[in-house]
Image: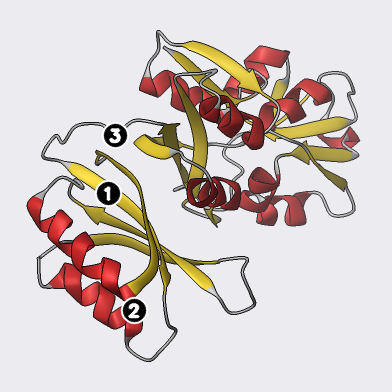
Amino acid sequence: MIIGLLGPKGTYSQKAANQLDITAQLMFFDDLEEVIESVLSNEVDCGIAPIENSLEGSIGITLDALWEFDINIMGEVIVSIRHCLLSKGRIEDIKVILSHPQALAQCRRFIHTQFKGVKIQTTGSTSHAAKHTSEFPEMAAIASTESARQYGLDILAHDIQDYKENHTRFAVLGREIPPATGHDKTSIIIHLANDRPGALYELLGEFAIRNINLTKIESRPSKMGLGDYLFYIDMEGHQLDTNVQDALNCIINLVDKLKIIGSYRLME
């Protein structure tokens, strides 16, 4: 199996890919847009993309792609995120800290208290930050222990994220719908036809009366106008389960658009 993911080597996406299939061939890309394009073009069998972090919330690029393109969630992988401060120099000589915007946000308190006045630069991935840092002793990267080993950096500080319970959910993106296992999750996106009092309540009631547990509800701008939103909903069950099918058939009449973006095995 060929898996497309964010590179270079040492990213948390690589950790997710290894958890999914340690034997897979990995194809690294410079950004998430290229990962998604590789799935759409069938250049890879599936792609790995972060979709939600326990500290910073959802990843907009991935959510937007699921709405805009013919792409599905085929599975998910939960990765424990443990950020480290990496450098070739000494901690007192650091003048610049680099990392992915998500990693910088997850370590906001550490940076503020320990490195006031230090320049902060964003990079396309945590491992890209580590790779660049390996060339300059006055730089430091926020990245993983794997990145430290990959690029020959010293770990100056461990577990620097603001909250120790830091996890990222990665979506396995592809074009197929996995079969039901009896322990599944279905994800959908809806756009309400009319914004009126009780519209969302009425829609959610269709799941409640069928005893379908909704594990996530999130709104996101539709990009069709200010105040216009899409709703991303995760529920327990497979889209082929009778009760899920019934609920989806009923809410079709209540929404402007309904898109099923995947049914896949539920992770504990």
Secondary structure type for disc 2: helix
Q: Amino acid at mark 1?
A: Thr
Residue 177 image label:
3
The numbered disc on residue 200 is: 2
Q: Is residue 247 left or right of residue 88?
A: left
Indicate which disc, 1 or 3, sits on the residue closer to the N terminus.
Answer: 3
Indicate the secondary structure of the residue bearing disc 3.
loop
Image position of 196 (left or right of 122):
left
Q: Based on the displayed image, in which of its 4 quarters is residue 98 positioned?
A: top right
Instruction: Bin the neighbour count of mark 2 within 10 Å (Cα to Cα): few under 14, some 14-19, many 20 and up.
Output: some
CA–CA distance between discs 1 and 2?
Answer: 18 Å
* Residue occupied by mark 1: 186
Question: Which amino acid lies under the numbered mark 3 shown in the image of this protein?
Answer: Ile
* Residue 205 pos. (x, y %): 20, 76
Residue 160 sits above or below residue 11 on the image: below
Looking at the rendered structure, the kind of residue marked 2 is: Leu
Q: What x and y, as percent, mark residue 80?
A: 44, 37
